[in-house]
Amino acid sequence: MINEVIKQNSLPVERYHPLITEADDLPIVEWLHKLRLHQIELDKKNNELRYAHVVQDEPRDCYVGLYDFAPVGYLTLTREGKIAEINPTAARLLGVDRRKLLPDHFSAFVTPKDIECCQLFFSGIKKHNQKNNTEMTLKRSDGAVFPVQMECLSVPSAGKGSMLRITLTESKQAKRVLHEDQTHTLDIEQASAEMGSWDWDITTGRVIFNERWAKIRGYRLGDIESHIDTWENSIYPNDFPAYDAALTAHLENSTPFFQAEYRVRTRSGSLIWLLNRGTVIQRDAEGNPLHMAGIEVDITERRNSDKIKTLKIKKLH
């Protein structure tokens, strides 16, 4: 019956369904069975297609996971040096919000002392198209600096020219060196803050002292006269001959520098030990000294410690 209805249509039966042809003369149950089998086949192909999409997306999802959660910082820079992509680790290293970072210039995070080296490094990568690595110091958004090991490779990008792929890892060795350098600098700054300084115009006797020079003796800078007599009159009499001999020897150019340890009496009346060291910085054509400068450090604690050690040694004998 259904075949008769279909045959009455002016269009060929096969236009309606590929399973039905003019030669078909099947009972309706068998025809429905074939139709069901065809439906199952279509569902199977759809499932295979969906599975293919899932399989295709898995590597991409895996890559995104590895990229976002990697312990190493990843960046992609444009040829102009702007940040095109960055993973959370790199953003954390730079101390910035990942969403607000793009498209900043990477050079904004390079310390001034390394900016030229960074530019030369990138230029070499672009020119030779080879992977290379280097160490440099970067700075976070809060101004803190940190050393990194940086690896870079130039890769082609459709419509954008070449891009730079970069990995960043904090360099432990460089970090240690930087820490030691900062510690050494801090030590120097602290030591400098504890030093008295003097600048002596030998021809006039005028001496320019710093604030620390006066403070060591218990005075304010404005309380003392800027003259060599202020200095020499404060030296403990018993120590003056050794001081004078050392100074005279250097003024006569017999020693490369002047150095002496002596006691001075402070404003409160107590005695402290000082180490004084300086050098002539200007002489006339005949070699006569014209200008001298130096530093002075309180060494009372060291001298007292040496004295205690000496007494202990004497007791042992």
Image (cartoon, grey):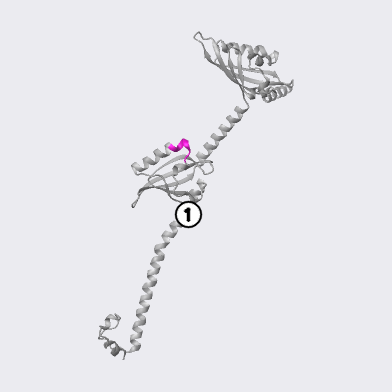
Q: Which residue sits furthest top?
A: 286
Q: Is residue 129 magenta?
A: no
Magenta residues, start to end:
110-115
Residue lying furthest front? 222
Q: Position of residue 250 (x, y in %)?
A: 57, 13
Q: Amino acid at mark 1?
A: Asp
Q: Is residue 181 or residue 139 the one in the foreground?
A: 139
Question: Residue 114, image x and y in percent?
Answer: 45, 37
The answer to whether any part of residue 71 appears in the image is: no
| Position above or below: 63 against 307 | below
Q: Is residue 297 left or right of residue 58?
A: right
Quadrant of the image for the N terminus?
bottom left
Against 193, residue 85 (above or below) is below
Mark 1 element type: helix
* Residue 234 point in image, percent of width and height: 69, 16
**Could you tell whether 162 is left or right of 258 in the image?**
left
In this view, 192 is above or below 60: above
Give the residue drawn at x 64%, y 25%: 212
